[in-house]
Amino acid sequence: MVIELMKSHASVRNYKEKQLTREEVEELIGAAQYAATSHFVQAYSVVWVTDPEKRRKLGELSKNPKQMEGAGAVFLMCADYNRLKHAVEMQGESIVYDQAENLLVAVTDVGLLAQNLALAAESKGYGICYIGGVRNNMEAISELVGLPEGVFPVYGLTVGVPNESNGVKPRLPVEAILHENDYDEKKYETILPEYDKNIQEYYGSRGSNQKTASWSQQMANFLNKPHRPDIKEVLAKKGYSFK
Amino acid sequence: MVIELMKSHASVRNYKEKQLTREEVEELIGAAQYAATSHFVQAYSVVWVTDPEKRRKLGELSKNPKQMEGAGAVFLMCADYNRLKHAVEMQGESIVYDQAENLLVAVTDVGLLAQNLALAAESKGYGICYIGGVRNNMEAISELVGLPEGVFPVYGLTVGVPNESNGVKPRLPVEAILHENDYDEKKYETILPEYDKNIQEYYGSRGSNQKTASWSQQMANFLNKPHRPDIKEVLAKKGYSFK
């Protein structure tokens, strides 16, 4: 049942008007929190953006206006060492979180929480979409919702009753992901061209949003240049100086 | 059902001997891959360590010998831009992944995959445990399983039939995690001392592995110093120079 639910996932970007209630939101987050967390640090916070004007601005800043305004709930999924700073200072100590390790921990903690939250919502019939676009303007978004030192939005998550949904996109075959005992990069020579064909067939067959580029063409067009070069500096201002 | 499954999560560190079959492993990973992935990059790989000598060494290097040797399956959950490098070069382009953005993307992609994998396994009655300890020796572990440029282990994941299990630890209350429209750090003044009491009661009541420290005491003892200061350098050698 859980496995079937996972395999039916497709991002939903177009929602019906129904807004999630506070009770629903608390149920979803209360379940998501039971994901594992490194050394029990729980280094995350969720900002639920309900104010219409803030949602409008957030949509602009993350370059997802239609989705941010139309969703049943909009969450900013945040890495958070601020709460830990309070806890550590309560004990008369000073916190250290400027290491690469701390960034890996916080981003991982947020990821496990977010995927539980997404799946919990999907198990209730909602659709979801992660919004990496919040990283286009992390600093302005931080100001918009008052994120203090130690807190930054890793991505947004929209949730709502699906109005329309894309098909489920074929993933890389398991053999591309799974390596036994030794990492084998030679196999990509044969696997990737086959996957390219499958993806092109899929894109050609779907009714809307047809694309003609293969997976490797999409990746080449996207990854041949740097993206969001300001992030290092924004993170450093938040205390994640990556030492 | 999914929400109840999430809320029953507790790390399992002691497993019965039964090993997962290849069919089971492929089913779990094949489901986990349907998690969302940033721009469809699928920037992850899983190394399944089955060789007894490699498992022994991995246990030593990650400071989890008993668990790594005793589990029903041992996975290294890896960030991976190596496969993408192959895809991009197939198209005659050069890949750029040395930005902070790329590290956030890869660690997030691994997190969503890993939490789906963990939950898929738990839905089949297995127990799981994340092993952050692999970051104690990322370079030696990379050599052990031949991880090339672009690939590093973010954490391990053990899976198996539970032999014994701790109780489910009480998380921070939802109100500590959830902020509406504006991040509110003032509330921690009252929430954290209450949570400290709850955690101490929980630790006092459980049968084994009793602890007396409150949550904020544990955090203070743990976070008053830097951890794993070599990680930045290891990541840079892998191509993640965090520009």
Image: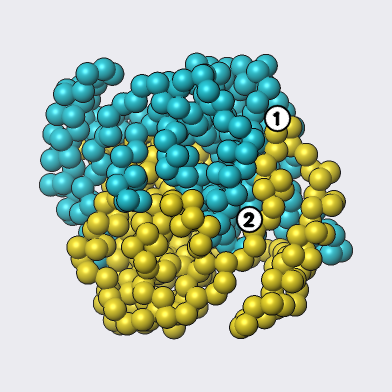
Chain colours: A cyan, B yellow
Across the whole image, how many numbered discs are drawn on residues? 2
Circle 2 — which element?
loop
Name which residue lies at 63% across and 55% down.
A42
Residue on which the image places disc 2: A42
Q: Is residue A238 left or right of residue B47?
A: right
Q: Nearer the viewer, residue A224 or A13?
A: A13
Residue density around tag 2, few if under 14, some if 14–19, many if 20 or more, within 10 Å: many
Residue on which the image places disc 1: B181
* Residue A193, image quadrant: top left
Disc 2 and disc 1 on one polypeptide chain: no
Chain identifier of the residue bearing label 1 in the image: B
Amino acid of disc 1: Asn
Amino acid of disc 2: Gln
Whether residue A69 is situated above or below residue B87 in the rendered picture: above
List x then y, in percent, for residue A135: 55, 32
Circle 1 — which element?
loop
Q: Is residue B186 left or right of residue B224?
A: right
